[in-house]
């Protein structure tokens, strides 16, 4: 870790408080943004931010996007240091792709309940029960799970990744059961085995809530992330004729941005983590975007606070490291992921 020497804006850095819920005490205002940009320049670093980050973090970043777009940007970034404003598996993926770069995450405690829903040991045992099956893991997994995987995917390209596998091969898809159900629906594959993991934020956006909102906003479009517990209900509503099927879109966070730019709707109901609303409102200011569940906030994403980012840039911490052998094995599955499908959505 390289601690920067020189003068810092002490009026800001002295305010940083480290607590059990993360770093706090600093406002994401113009003075903070100017200091962040100055420190990024001093480090020769680029700042990548996921679509679920706090608005101030998204606004100060060099690139904002979905998991796939950010992985691609990280792989090609000319800078020697990548600061990843997102959760730990995302920063780890950047390190896997760029082992010689310094990858920093503003708070390494920013985990992911979905990534925690399968371990490498559990995956090895599952593989032993299905010899010869191709393993497709969502990018929301640890490096150790990626190292046991044939092809990673994100919500942007999960369908294309599975479709690229010969139809007669069994596929083990982990860890998200709702994304797995979406892929099974889209590909029609009966030999796709799905792990029963879930993201606590998206699983909590349930079908009843979605149905109630859809009925009270009959002219709106529906953007639904495939990790949502309500993705099946959305298609069911459309299938039953309760909602026009051309107004229901199952999309990654980047796909939502593309759809927003192309949409002619005046109102869109959004079923995903609430951080997404910031980029959607920027992309299409004429549309009224409403969260299906306004409590759907990821506490891990929100650990990347203005204070955490400032501390990261001053101290050069937290640095992300991945064991070389694990990284080499994981790189194969992640590289295949970024080669397949559409580019992912980002700036
Ligand atoms: P995207 O791949 O759509 O960016 O989603 C990432 C994620 O963590 C969803 O919860
Ligand atoms: Fe993980 Fe869910 Fe948070 Fe995405 S929203 S980072 S899947 S816990």
Image (cartoon, rainbow, N blue to C red):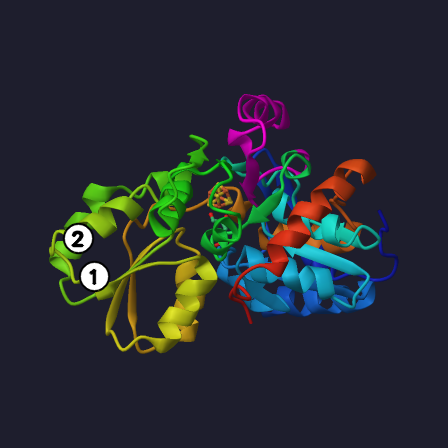
Label ID, residue 55: none
- Give the residues drawn in magenta, as a range: 116-144
Residue drawn at point x = 57 percent, y = 58 percent? 68
Residue nearest the observer in this picture, 340 or 206 = 340
- Decide: few, some or many residues near mark 1? Use Cα within 10 Å; few <14, some 14-19, many ≥20: some
Q: Is residue 325 visible?
A: yes
**Is the CB–ligand 1 distance for label 2 below 8 Å?**
no
Could you tell whether 29 is left or right of 43 in the image? left
Is residue 174 magenta-colored? Answer: no
Residue 189: percent from the left, percent from the top?
Answer: 39, 43
Is residue 122 magenta-colored? Answer: yes
User: Pointers 2 and 1 in contact (CB under 8 A)?
Assistant: yes
Residue under pointer 2: 239
Residue under pointer 1: 245
Residue 168: percent from the left, percent from the top?
Answer: 48, 41
Cα distance, mark 2 to mark 1?
7 Å
Residue drawn at point x = 82 percent, y = 66 percent? 42
Residue 130: percent from the left, percent from the top?
Answer: 53, 26
Q: Secondary structure at mark 1?
A: helix
Q: With respect to residue 254, does 301 lie above or below?
A: above
């Amino acid at each position: 870790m390289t601690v920067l020497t020189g003068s810092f804006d002490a009026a800001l850095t002295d305010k940083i408080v480290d607590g059990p819920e993360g770093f706090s005490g600093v406002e994401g205002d113009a003075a903070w943004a100017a200091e962040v940009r100055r420190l990024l320049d001093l480090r020769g670093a680029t700042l990548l931010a996921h679509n679920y980050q706090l608005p101030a973090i998204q606004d100060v970043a060099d690139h904002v996007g979905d998991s796939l777009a950010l992985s691609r940007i990280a792989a090609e970034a000319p800078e020697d240091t990548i600061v990843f404003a997102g959760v730990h598996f995302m920063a780890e993926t950047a390190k896997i792709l760029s082992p010689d770069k310094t990858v920093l995450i503003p708070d390494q405690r920013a985990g992911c309940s979905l990534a925690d829903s399968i371990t490498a040991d559990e995956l090895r045992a599952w593989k032993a029960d299905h010899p010869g099956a191709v393993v497709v893991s969502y990018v929301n997994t640890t490096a150790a799970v990626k190292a046991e995987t044939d092809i990673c995917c994100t919500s942007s390209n999960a369908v294309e990744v599975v479709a690229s596998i010969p139809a007669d091969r069994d596929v083990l898809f982990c860890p998200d059961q709702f994304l797995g159900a979406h892929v099974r629906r889209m590909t029609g594959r009966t030999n796709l085995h799905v792990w029963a993991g879930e993201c606590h934020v998206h699983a909590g956006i349930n079908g009843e809530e979605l149905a109630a909102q859809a009925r009270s906003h009959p002219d709106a479009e529906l953007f639904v992330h495939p990790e949502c517990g309500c993705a099946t209900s959305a298609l069911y509503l459309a299938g039953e004729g309760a909602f026009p099927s051309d107004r229901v879109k199952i999309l990654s966070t980047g796909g939502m941005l593309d759809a927003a730019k192309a949409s002619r709707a005046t109102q869109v109901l959004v079923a995903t983590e609430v951080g997404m609303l910031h980029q959607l409102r920027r992309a299409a200011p004429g549309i009224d975007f409403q969260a299906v569940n306004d409590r759907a906030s990821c506490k891990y994403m929100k650990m990347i606070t203005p204070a955490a980012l400032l501390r990261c840039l001053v101290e050069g911490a937290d640095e992300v490291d991945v064991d070389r052998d694990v990284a080499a094995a994981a790189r194969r599955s992640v590289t295949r992921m970024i080669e397949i499908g559409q580019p992912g959505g980002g700036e």
